[in-house]
Amino acid sequence: MTDEPAGRPADLLIRAAAVHTLVDGEPPQRAVAVTGGRIIALSPEPDGLDALVGPGTEVVDAPSATVLPAFDDTHTHLILAAHSVHGVPVHRARDLAGFLDLIRERAARTPAGQWILTTVNWQEVLLAEQRMPTTEELDGATADHPVMVRRGAYNVVLNSAALRLAGITEATEAPPGGVIERDARGRLTGRLINRAVELVERVLPRPSLAERIEGLRAASADYAATGIGTVRDCLVPVEDLDVLDAARAGGALAVRVRVLVSGFAARTAEQVDALLDRMDEWRANGRDDDRLRLWGVKFGIDGGFEAGALEEPYQGQPCYHGRLLWEPTELLAAVDRVVERGWRVGVHAWGDRGLRVLLDVFEQVLKHRPDLPSGTLVVEHGGLARAEQRARAVALGVPVTVQHPLLHDGALTQQRAWGEERTAALFPLREWLDEGAQLSAGSDFPVGPYGAMVSVWGMTTRGTTAGVVGPEHAIERAEAVALHTVNAARLTGEGSERGSLRPGSLADLTLWPVDPLSCPADALRELRPVRTVVGGRTVHLS
């Protein structure tokens, strides 16, 4: 297929059963050669590139294995994963007793007064009791430490010591867009939701830079171990740009990182401008490169499982339709300020009302600025997308990121709030693709598990913790793989450099023990690569 290039020998040569290049119309190849971080040649014969073997070439003979491009996770939270690396591993618990025992064990070896934090990738509905722990129960695990139990990005439960340090009392009012939960008698439960989480975040101790870097090293390596080569981190505090920069300088980023700076705390024009000033400074200093790149700003129009904005009321709550976190005119002004400065915007929209209002905002921005580059405005999730809304997104040319792992972990929680019918309608991938949408895929970790093939398995089977939901929305394997590769690279504006395997492209590839495009469906869920290569460097080897 490809003429052998003259010049220096290959740094890496892989011979495999199949090399799926994902170039349209191109049959599988059998060998791929890499030099200087880029692919230099492919061949339909396993020995077709042997002339490129030199004394320093690493030759990988894998006659039963399959090569694919490395996958992107187009909506995830690497920063949260790094924070969570050393948290109490409550995601392993199966009931509240086990959950509290893990906290109690950590407390026994932690000096009194130090904070105890948990991992964030768990769901209360998967515990036997199907509920969050209470402040009283956390106090029973330890009264000598402030404890913050975190589930995902927007839900925490605090024990009494943590509530005191956060200054939260019965008289504390929640900030706009946040909830301080109370029980039927008006007493604090310890749970904070959405923007109320900021009340405790501001008093948490700051880990050292070295600790942050080591967290990123461990977390990014674990992403790579699942076949992920690039992450689009969709909630990065602007001050953490320096942490990511230091991690890159220290060789701690196993994956490429595309950053969406969090705009959740930027509510006024002055706050948005201050955020953009810091981003402009980053850009002016030329700190972007292939490993770490600043993509744009992240906002959110509505809540998640318990607060996504719906056209029809929640199940069993006839007066509750979820929450819009912005007045549309204010979000319009914020988005317009961002794009005016040449940055892109991704906005979380979960419920159908949230998506409708967001598309109203995007439509106004595009009317005001008809020459905006394609892909400047992105819908993050678009979970409950009705036919009319899908048609509008396609007509506006607005890309959408989707995350089946989020549905996988959250299906039971969502069924409780929305009912089975609306939950099954989430992520209508078959319809989106048939209607011409610009889709790409990710995980939304920590709500859903990250990993190349667990996502492909979910998109093609619609399997979840609640069983198979909405099977009519399933897509084919090749389509699912494309959402994480070709389409994902197009979303970040890197389609000419990544996402497919061709001479001259960045050498981001994965080697799988079986062919993910044809192996049994049951094998996909736990399938992991034997090697992940990013920029020609092996970042995972098993």
Image (cartoon, rainbow, N blue to C red):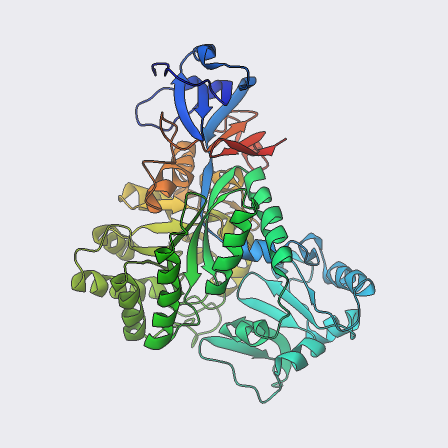
Q: Considering the image in quadrants, where does the N terminus appear? A: top left
| Percent coordinates x, y for residue 305 in the rendering | 49, 63
Side of 486 relative to 316 (left or right): left
Say which residue appears at 48% left-offset and 25% top-offset: 67
Residue 442: x and y, percent?
45, 47
> In the rendered view, would you say 131 is above or below 89?
below
> Is 354 located above or below residue 490 in the figure?
below
- Return the residue nearer the eye: 245 or 158: 245
Rendered-image quadrant of the C terminus: top right
Residue 431 visible, this orientation: no
Q: Is residue 407 above or below residue 272?
A: above
The reply, left or right, for residue 394 in relation to residue 190 is: left
| Number of marks present in the image shown | 0
The residue that appears at 34% across and 14% down in the rendered structure is 3
- Residue at 63% x, 81% y is 188
Where 487 sits versus 90, above or below? above
Res. 327 image quadrant = bottom left
Residue 91 rendering spot, x and y as whole percentages: 66, 54
View extreme (right): residue: 108
Pinpoint residue 96: horizontal percent, then vertical percent: 72, 62
Of all residues, the one furthest to the bottom in this rendering is 171
Nearest the camera: 33 or 469? 33
- Which residue: 56% across, 78% down? 180
Q: Is residue 249 visible?
A: yes
